[in-house]
Structure formats: structure tokens, C-alpha cells
Amino acid sequence: MSQTVDRALSILPLLAEGPADLGQVADRLGVHKSTALRLLRTLHEHGLVYRQADQRYRLGARLFALAQEAVENLDVREIAHPHLVALNEKVGHTIHLAVYEENEVLYIDKVESRYPVRMYSRIGKPVAITVAAVAKLLLADLSEPERRAVAEKLDYPAYTARSTPNAPAFLRELEKVREQGWATDLGGHEESINCIGAPIRGADGRVVAAMSMSAPNVVVTAEELLTLLPLVRRTADAISREYSGAVPVSKETPAKETPAKAAPSTPSTPSKEVTP
Amino acid sequence: MSQTVDRALSILPLLAEGPADLGQVADRLGVHKSTALRLLRTLHEHGLVYRQADQRYRLGARLFALAQEAVENLDVREIAHPHLVALNEKVGHTIHLAVYEENEVLYIDKVESRYPVRMYSRIGKPVAITVAAVAKLLLADLSEPERRAVAEKLDYPAYTARSTPNAPAFLRELEKVREQGWATDLGGHEESINCIGAPIRGADGRVVAAMSMSAPNVVVTAEELLTLLPLVRRTADAISREYSGAVPVSKETPAKETPAKAAPSTPSTPSKEVTP
DNA sequence: AATGACCGTTGCATATCTTGCAACGGCGTC
DNA sequence: GACGCCGTTGCAAGATATGCAACGGTCATT
């Protein structure tokens, strides 16, 4: 809606591919060099792009800082983190936390496995949306027409033989996840890795986030992993309760029923917070 | 230099403080609501801001993705990472990697301590520039006038009694670091935490990054930590050599076979990730 | 239930701000 | 030494962003 800003912002994904010089940027934007120069200057002043020694432009430092602050403002994350760590310390496997936003599912927290086998995933990375357990959980909560709309638009890459092949299969899977209240990814993304996940719900029952536990076959089989499902679900439920306004329980005593905050229109508690 | 873009980008740090509605954004920008609306729309289309259920705006998902891609395009990081992991596996302490950019020092990689004691730091977070070992190393490499210019502009927060108190003291410290080729932070940021660091140099001898090892007093004393200095310096030197174009030594260095090609414009290896 | 206030949204006319052009200067190459 | 390449700047023309005023919806108040 604003041409100038639109062009300026288009530079960012372009630079994400790698450093580029003025001419390249101008060409790919389809504008005159002088125009590109001025846009880059403005981005530079805001720290979003950085000019390296060879005069080429790269994405800048403030981008990290912004992303960092953004992720820290997500209150689900704040609340969930200690629970995730506790679960990780109990079972040792990798724990992920993810949210759905604007047709994308992305990890917002992760606790690394204690086992030497490392997985590659990163906070901020978009998730393989058609197969990941957390993605299924988050999408399953959408309304039926929404689910269908999303499912139609997706690609269905065949990561493995067990990847979700197409939209109908995906929708069936979402239906199943919706009913049972938990999800799995058994080798759907990487042949040797299984995940189980559970939803985290807000006071109104809507799914606000999803968590999962992942482990490679070489550590535990899928069946063994599934025996941990109750643990995962309990953790997710505990997070849900706390997120919905319940007082954090002191220990692992599932404990006291605290009156859920009934206020439908949550008083605008400014979620202002300061990082030490 | 471009007013429109300037205004649009000013919204981002504003939203980083927390969600805000249209009126607030317009006020703080000093523009009409309709103008703010159009700017926000453009930002929204690019995924940089997200509109949550209560209609307020937040920083968006693409911001993470961009920061992520950006950090992965840093070739120093690519090269250093396996070395950092190896060092961490040997000694168990937390390892950081940082670069200097535009008057800021920021972490671009981190390998967590194996010990239960966690430290507070995050990739992307600006470093406590006046006390951190990595900051000293990076600034020490600047020319004398540059160092002075930077040192004058800085604030010198007294995190602890051992924090660098002022510019002259900082410049002396930088001089010392410059001569000895390594740096420490002994309780300058957190009373109970010590760090030792070493510089990573490019082919031309300039410092391109710095790494450090951190450990709390309760795990090892400062003296014990200092006995690990040779290990840190060797690791840093190994990274420097590889970054300068040398073939990775086959010894304990990770098995990443690459022809001795110094080309820095290496296409980043598509990072495999695993879905929960 | 009706009213009023608030907030986000839209169409439009004005004028501000951006754009492309052409020319300059630095730099490495032929 | 001259040429070509790339980043940079001043300027005029015109496209584009801006503020205004009005609309419509939602929520709180009476």
C-alpha cells in the first residue's frame, strides 16, 4: 500500500540470500540505482542492513536484536519455558515450542536433547508444516473452512515415504489430531526421527501454542516414545492452566484448582517487561 | 533519507517494546492515524508485523526468519561452530562467538554449558560492551583513534565492583588485550561469572570475530579457568586458519572436507532440520 | 434498549516527497 | 594514460504519501 516502504522492505529478503551490491539490488527491485541507494541508506540508518568492507550490503545487527525482543515478548514462551526445561531434564529428549502465525508455524523455543545426537532446528525457523506434530496441532484448531483453505495452498514435499502426501490426507490427519487431542510425526520428516506433541490452550480453549518431544530411533523406538505421551500431555496441560491465569503450582503436584480467571475481556494488563 | 521508510522502520523498535494499537503507534510516530495504518499495512504484508486477535500489532514472524537466514550467512559462524562444539564437549563450559558491527558487539553463536548452571545470554543480544571479554578483543583491534572515539561514546554501567569504570580504564584495558592477544572478564558483568576469550583473525590479520569460554565461580575458580586459556587460544587459532583458507586439519577438527578454496562466498549449506 | 464515545477504516485533494536522469569523481583495468 | 565501472549528488517533474473529514462498527454507559 505504500510503494516506497514496499520497495525498501523487499530488499530484506533479497539480502537474506546473501550479500549484494548496489547494482544488484537496484536491478532486482527494478528501480534506478540512486533510488536503491537511498532506500539502502534508510535501512542502514535503522541498522537493518550493514555495509561490509567490500561495500556490499548485508542484513544488519538490529534485525537480531528485534527478533530477540520480539520472541521475548511472547508470554506463552515465558510461561512455558520452565516447564519445557523440567520435562527435558526428566526425559532428556529435545523439546520444541511452536506457534501459528500468518500461515506459518514457527518454533519459538527449544530445549536441546541431552543425548549426543543433535537435531537441526532453530528458533525462528519455519516448520515443515505438513508433517510436524506441532504444525498438525496448531492447524487442527482452525475452523474447518480455514483448515481447508490452508491445506489447499500448501506444498506437500515428500521428505520421506511417510510424509503427508497431499491435502486430503493432511485434512484427515488434522481431523484425527483434533479428536484425539495430541499428534505425532513418525518419520514423516526425517526417516529416523519421531515426535509426539500436545496442544497448549488459552482460557477460551483455543490452541495458542503446541509443544513436542522428539527423539531419533537410535535412542528410543516410536513405541517407547509413545509411552511418554502422558507426560507430554500433562506438561502441556500445566502450561495451559498457567497461561490461562492459574497460579503456578509449586511442585509437580498437579494440585489445587484455582478459579480460572473468568474475565472474558481480559483487562489490558500491559505486558511490559524488562530484561535484566 | 527517505521519510516514509524512515517512519515505517521506526515502528519496529516501537513494537519491540510490546504490542501497541493503531492510536499509540500514530501518536509515537507523530503522524495521522491513517498514515500509521498504511505504514503498518505495508509492514504487515511483508510479515514484519503481526496483528493479534485483539487487533493490536506485534512484531511478526518473518523477522525471525530473516534474522535466522542472516546469521546463517555469516561464514565465520559456519566455520567456527564445529570447533566451538568440540571445545564445549571437551571442557563443558559455555562458549560464545561474537562479532563487532556498527558500534555494537553481538553474539552470533553460543554453545550451552553442560553444567546445570545457566547463564543469561542470547544469540542476537547486544553484549555488555565495556566488560565482556569478546567485546574487548573486538574493540582492541580497532585503530587507536577509533578505539578512543568508541570509548568516549560508551556508557560504563557498574554491573559489579569490578566492572570497567570509565573510558580511560577501558582504553588501558584494550591496550593490554591488544598486546597479550587474549582477554578476560573476571566478574565484571556478573559477580560470580568469569570469562576468558581469544580473537579470530582473517587472512589479513584483522580480528573478524572473538570467542570466549564462561564459567561461574561455583564450578571453577578464575585460576582454574585460566588454565584452560591455551585450549581456547588454540581453538581460536584453528578457526582463524580455516577461515583464512587453510584446509581443516584432519586431527580433531570436524570432518568437513572442503577443497582448499578461500572463496568466502560459499553457498551456505542448506541446513537440515527436524520436525517434532 | 438506546445513546454516545472510541477506534479502525476509506476517498479525496493537496502538496510533499520520491523518483529517474544526467553528470561527477574515485578506482581498477585494459 | 584512457576507458569503463560503480557509487554518489543536485535537480526538476511528477507520482505518491499525507492529513482531513466522514463512515461504520464495537463496546461501555445511562
Image: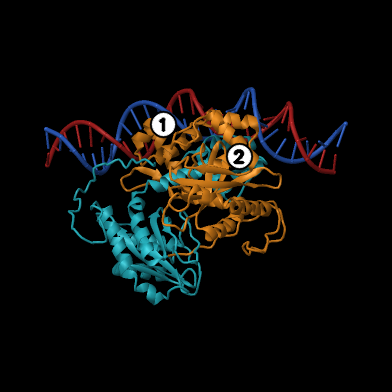
Chain colours: A cyan, B orange, C red, D blue
Element at badge 2?
Answer: helix
Residue A50 visible? The answer is no
Could you tell me residue B112's position as x and y percent?
A: 48, 55
Dot 1 corresponds to which residue? B29
Badge nearest the viewer, 1 or 2: 2
Horizontally, residue A244 falls left or right of residue B142, namely: left
With respect to residue B71, does A217 lie above or below?
below
Could you tell me residue A102's position as x and y percent?
A: 41, 53
Could you tell me residue B245's position as x and y percent?
A: 70, 54
Residue B68's label in the rendered image is: none
Say which label, 1 or 2, has the lower sequence index.
Answer: 1
Q: Quadrant of the C terminus of chain B?
A: bottom left
Residue B41 visible? The answer is yes
Dot 2 corresponds to which residue? B177
Chain identifier of the residue bearing label 1 in the image:
B
Measured Cα–Cα span from mark 1 to mark 2: 43 Å
Could you tell me residue B51's position as x and y percent?
A: 37, 46
**Residue at horizontal 20%, vertical 48%?**
A263
Horizontally, residue B192 falls left or right of residue A76, namely: right
Residue D20 in which image quadrant: top left
Q: Amino acid at mark 2?
A: Val
Horizontally, residue A179 falls left or right of residue B145, namely: left
**Residue at horizontal 61%, vertical 52%?**
B230
Whether marks 1 and 2 lie on the same chain? yes
Element at badge 1?
Answer: helix
Residue A237 in which image quadrant: bottom left
Q: Amino acid at mark 1?
A: Leu
